Image: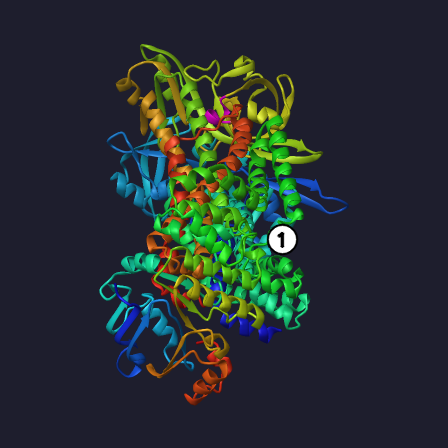
Amino acid sequence: MTTHAVRLNTVTKTYGHGTQAVHALRGVTVDLPRGGFTAVMGPSGSGKSTFLHCAAGLDTPTSGTVHLGEVELSGMNETQLTELRRQKAGFVFQAFNLIPALSVTENITLPLRLAGARPDRAWLAEVIARVGLGDRTGHRPSQLSGGQQQRVALARALVTRPEVVFADEPTGALDTRTAAEVLGLLRQVVDATGQTVVMVTHDPVAAAYADRVLFLAGGTLVDEVWSASADAIGRRLAGLGGYGRPAEAARC
Amino acid sequence: MLRLAFATLRGRMSSLAGSFLALLFATAVITSCGLLMETGLRANTPPERYAAAPVVVAGDQWVSVGIKAGGDTSAEMSEPLPEPVAVPAALAGKIRKVEGVTRVVPELTFPVGLVGRDGRLVGGAGGRTLGHAWESAVLAPYTLRAGRAPAAPGEIVLDAALAGRARLEVGGTARVLGRDGVREYTVAGIAGPGLPRQSSVFFTAERAAELFGRPGRVSAFGVTGQGDPEQLKERIDAALDGAGVVAHAGAERGLADDIQALTGREMLVGLSGSLAGIAVMVAVFVVSGTFALTARQRQREIALLRAIGATPRQVRMMLGREALLVGTVAAALGLPLGVAVGDWMFGRFVSLGLLPDTFTLAVGPLPMLAAVVAGLATAWLAARAAVRRATRIRPTEALGEAAMEHRALGRGRMISGLAFLALGSGVTGLAMSMTGETAAASAGGIVLFLVTAAALLGPWLVRLAAGLVGGALGRASRVGGYLAVANTRVGAKRLASVVSPLILLMAFAATILFTQSTLGHAATRQASEGNRADYVLEAAGPGLPAQAARAARALPGVKGVTEVIETQVIAHHEQLGDPMLTSYGAIGLTVPAHGIDLGVRAGSLDRLDDGGVALSTLSAGTLDASVGEKVRLRLGDGTPVTRTVVAVYERGLGFGDVALPYSVVRDHSASGMTGRLYVVGGEKDRLTGLAPGLTVLDRAEVATARDAAQELSDMANLLVLGMIIVFIAISVVNTLVMATGSRVREFALLRLVGGTRRQVLSMVRWEALLVGGIAVTVGTAVAAPTLMALSYGVTGSPWPYVPPLAYAAMAAATLGLAFAASLVPARTVLLGRPAEQIRG
């Protein structure tokens, strides 16, 4: 049994050709161990999103290898990647996480249905209870607050017992208090079930919930901290430079 | 606000593309209708026969009645006459007295046939060979190339081109078919030049008058005079006011020459008029549909504008102006497309022989202006109506709500939907209780009402369908079907806007095609059931002379012969207290009739010759006349008659809606010859020799010939209505592409949570099936009452004739369109990277 949940080995990602080529990742090597909560930070254009996409099998690297659990992703086609993601990855996004037409329970069990699997009743109930939505299972997304919607998304990410939960700015659209609730929930999931979580964020406060924070700049890993406070993370981030434009940073 | 409209327009190109396309095609369709109509009003054929006469005085080819249209204003209703109207010869004196007139030449024109050496007719130029008196040869002008003018009844002068084809020279013997049969003449002279679209045979004045067959009357007068022909024409018109004649000058003289040009013009005006009406209706329907969809997709943006301080009025103004900008660009591109389409259709009409090939398409500014105005007005109104709801939303709730479906559907929407449904049902009921064409004419209105009702009630229909088949679908397909049903149930309004144009397509196409099939089938059935003859003799050329019928009767084995002429009559009647004119296909037949059974239901044809007339159930219903009552008719050449109804028969579609005595119709037709003989008994070979240019058809061949004729008339309608169907189909595709293209984030999410492309496509496929299924079902339900009302009104049976294969093809096309227009854009969306797409 491997100890890492995700392993990237000299991963590069280049968009475009020749003079117009954009090097989003320039040889990233990192191991994300099981049961860890990792935050990925960096200024706009640092390659945060590309890092997440490559790690989650949403995008294929130009060179280098990516392992999700024991499986090597290179050479897989789109359908194989989708089926792998189904088993090994859960996703939480900033917004538009839920299918408006489906109820809370239906949204949560959607990945199982897509995989043609039956939900494990006990586990489903536990997941729903864990995110605190026991009384809302029949509601539709439009009847839920933003924080509740993110909790449904988290439950959906957990329901398949994935290797890794990938979160892309999961609190970007939430107020401070609701954000804290959702982040606390993520932390709790890691602590209680040993779930691996990888989160991209621009917010030092959010990153402070993680065990480990990776800093990306110009497509390479430039720094990392373990169990740091929001202030400490903020200082490191400011030290990377190019971070004086918060409006733009929020987009990345 | 205009600047804001410009700015948002630039940023919104893709979402406005749908509205833009709908408007572009709407403008194009309206433009092409307008062009055809203007052509119908203005097209002229170049004068041939009267090229040398500056002014031509001919009969008025229109029958008119005045209608009191409220107050003092009075409108006029006119119907064209199918046979040339003869004018009194005595008018010549009156015309001569008009100031500036130097010469008045009376003209006689009558169809004849030159019989070739092989016993067949020699084809005239443009398919016409016309007889005249040599005295009027100057009107073309024809001049002698060889020989001399005819001096005796047995002498003629031939058109050089015709003589060449028949290989006749001066001194030769020509056999010419005329009103009194085939006679031999000596060719006294050859005259040139030949005219491009008609051939001429010149007789002496007395002989021409005999063959013309209407003593004291002439076809027209060619008038030569001093000064401007237009002024001369006006002076003549003023002098002859009330005499039932019309003076023509300039290009208009061609109309006096060729009555076909007149009917062609009439056909164009009628066809393009009704087409324009339908086109505008369809345009309003599809354009407002696409604008509604665009507005829904832009709710977030509208809400944002409201939130940052735009008043509802400002938002409406902005979107209204934006629509005008889109409409202007669309119109600019739609106009040339419309001209191209109009030109193509015009060309098709000409090649089908419905219009003389001398007509040219009139491309004037007026139809284009009308199309642009109609397009812009539609765009503006549609945009305003579409955003009305969005701007009523309070800004705070708007932002949260934008992505979601409005849960409550408007009560007003349901009420107006039900009102349209009631209206449509009411008209159907009314139409069924009425008789005659009124019932048939109401069919169009029924389709309109019911399709509008279906569009308004669309969301409920979608929910109903989802409720009915949802369970089964979810079980049949655990992922695709399940998601499709969930989407359908919740996104009922989005799907309804997609379903509406599909319903319109199905209902419209079904109504058009099956109206034709019902009428065509009934006509064919009636004609074949009513045809009891062993052989039908068809005339090619001017007709069959009276001798042919006499000879046929004398043939051994022949048990009975009926002489028949087909024509048209115009009936005077009243509708809702206003005088009305209705044109009917009519038949003149000899009684007692042999080999032809009109299916008499009341009265008897026996007394037809005695001032009688027989009416079909259809015309009897419209004219509100029963046996024993009198009806006022205009015969083919405009002669008014009042005749007593002696019988009512049922096979009007097969034989014509008015039956008159043979002699009455013959005496008021141009050729004065029989069109067709129905023969009971006899032998084919012997019948063939009765007259030149004769085709003998047995029963099967008659049916085949009929089908061919039916197909030709169907083609004209299909051509025009096909354009509307294509227009609707384009908007269907447009709407579906818009609707599917806007689901980028939804598809991305499905893929990110583990859905494969195949699963997403499966969902789209099931949704398309559901949408297409609803469209086929509701479209059929809309077309059915329409067709039943029509069928009942015209055939008396409420069951329309629907060929199963045609229906299946139509349903398959509707479903196929729904599939293709959903799956193609979905595939394109799925090519993108979901992780990026979900960020919006």
Tell me, yes or no, if residue B252 can be seen here.
Answer: no
Q: Which residue is drawn at 37% across and 51% down?
A: A114
Q: In this view, does B720 lie above or below A34?
A: above
Is B394 on the left-hand or right-hand side of B210?
right
Residue B770 point in image, percent of width and height: 44, 43
Badge 1: chain ID:
B
Seen from this angle, which residue lies furthest right? B71
Q: Name the residue under label 1.
A: B235
- Type of residue at label 1? Arg
Foreground residue among B13 and A124: A124
Residue B621 colored magenta? no
Looking at the magenta stretch, what is its main secondary structure? helix
Callout 1: 10 Å neighbours few (<14), some, many (20+)? some
Foreground residue among B280 and B91: B280
The picture quadrant where one finds residue A223 is bottom left
Is B799 on the left-hand or right-hand side of B642?
left
Segment colored magenta: B651-656
Q: Is residue B35 above or below residue B475?
A: below
Residue B654 colored magenta? yes
Residue B56 point in image, percent of width and height: 52, 48
Residue B55 point in image, percent of width and height: 53, 51
Tell me, yes or no, if residue B176 can be seen here.
Answer: yes
Q: Is residue A225 above or below residue B114?
A: below
The picture quadrant where one finds residue B769 is top left
Count up the numbered dots. Answer: 1
Q: Which residue is drawn at 46% across and 76% down?
A: A207
Residue A164 point in image, percent of width and height: 36, 64
